[in-house]
Each structure stands twice: as structure tokens, then as C-alpha cells.
Amino acid sequence: MIPKEELTTVILAGGTSRRMGRDKAFLDLNDQTFIERILQVVKKVTPQVIIIANTLQYNSLNVPVYPDLMKDCGPVGGIYTAMEIVETPYLLVLSCDIPLLNTAVLKHLINESVPCDANILTTEGHWQPLTAIYNSKTKSIFKKALDAKTLKLRSLLASMSLHEIACPKVLIPCLNNINTPNDLKEMRDGYKN
């Protein structure tokens, strides 16, 4: 287990949301935006939280917000930016489009984590690289990838020492990410308090 004092939660919200057509973080579920819901959960799990985003809209959330150091480089650029800023040895990296996230799934990830380059949550054998804990010592791997324009996060993982953590089946729905208007409609239709 990596102690929570060694973790900073990093919420990546710098994407273009092309398929949705608008900023996913500010979509809402039960009168609460996705980003508000995620912040409510992560603040119960780690003492430090930052957002990587390229718009002033996030400044109203009372959480430090930093723009990408290298624009249009996706999650690889966002994680690298966070590694340049964060002082803790580990980063708990999350995307901004998982509004059903809960503390149970994050506690499972943290409790099962070990010192390595990356602790990756898996769902039915598939990596969830945006629900993961990255060692800040891997910053050079991210920088090298950015310099080479290798922007697929999964490509970087091949050069890291990974610890895969299976997400319990009952918690898998907490990780459903919302990418399209249809995803949003289905989630809202099926949501139960």
C-alpha cells in the first residue's frame, strides 16, 4: 500500500471532448457537475488534489488548476505537467469523465498498490490507465515520449514496471466514462441514487 500522504490526486481535464461536443467535466448528474462529484470523492481519499486544465472555468472549484505545459498532448502531456508540479512521490491520476467514481474503488487501488512505476487498475483484464497511480520518478519516460511525439499512454506503459490491480466486479460500473451524448443519456436514465 502506498500511504495517502505520498499521493497527490491529479484530475486530467484538458481534453477537447470532441465526441461529446462540450467540456465533459461540466456535464451534470443529479444537479452536480462531473468534476464536482469527482472532487467530492477524491478529497475523502487524498489530502492533496490538483486539476490539469486549459480553461479558467475550473478556477471556481477551490482546487489548484494548472495548464498543460505542452498543449494538445493528451493524457501523456497532462501527467507530465502534473509531475513537474507535484511534490509527492506518487500521483493518483484520474480522468474527469467518470462521474460514478466512489471512494471504495480508490481505496482498493491505493490499498493494493506497491512501490513501482505504475499501479494500474484493470477491469476484466483491460488496463484503466486513467485510474492509476504513477511514480513521479517516471517523469523522464513521459518527457522522452513527448519529445518523440509518442502520445499514446498505453505505449509508455510497456516501458514501465507495472502492477496490475483487478477492480472488483461490483465496482466496475464506477469507472464508466462518458464520451458521447448517448453515453450521457444512458447513464442518466440508469442512475439510481
Image (cartoon, grey):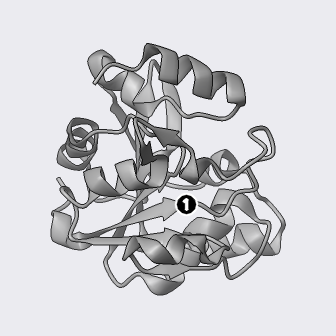
Q: Based on the displayed image, in which of its 4 quarters is residue 44 positioned? A: bottom left
Which residue carries the number 1 mark? 12
Up-down relation of residue 11 to residue 55 (above or below): above
In depth, the one of 181 and 167 nearer the eye is 181
Q: Is residue 164 left or right of residue 65?
A: left
Task: Tell me which residue sits at (68%, 82%) in the image.
Answer: 69
Q: Position of residue 188 (x, y in %)?
A: 50, 23
Task: Tell me which residue sits at (34%, 57%) in the image.
Answer: 39
User: Secondary structure under badge 1?
Assistant: strand
Q: Position of residue 163 (x, y in %)?
A: 37, 44
Task: Tell me which residue sits at (51%, 22%) in the image.
Answer: 187
In depth, the one of 1 and 92 nearer the eye is 92
Q: Based on the displayed image, in which of its 4 quarters is residue 30 positioned? A: top left
Q: Is residue 65 visible?
A: yes
Three-letter code, disc 1: Leu
Q: Position of residue 43 (x, y in %)?
A: 24, 61
Q: Is residue 155 left or right of residue 18?
A: left
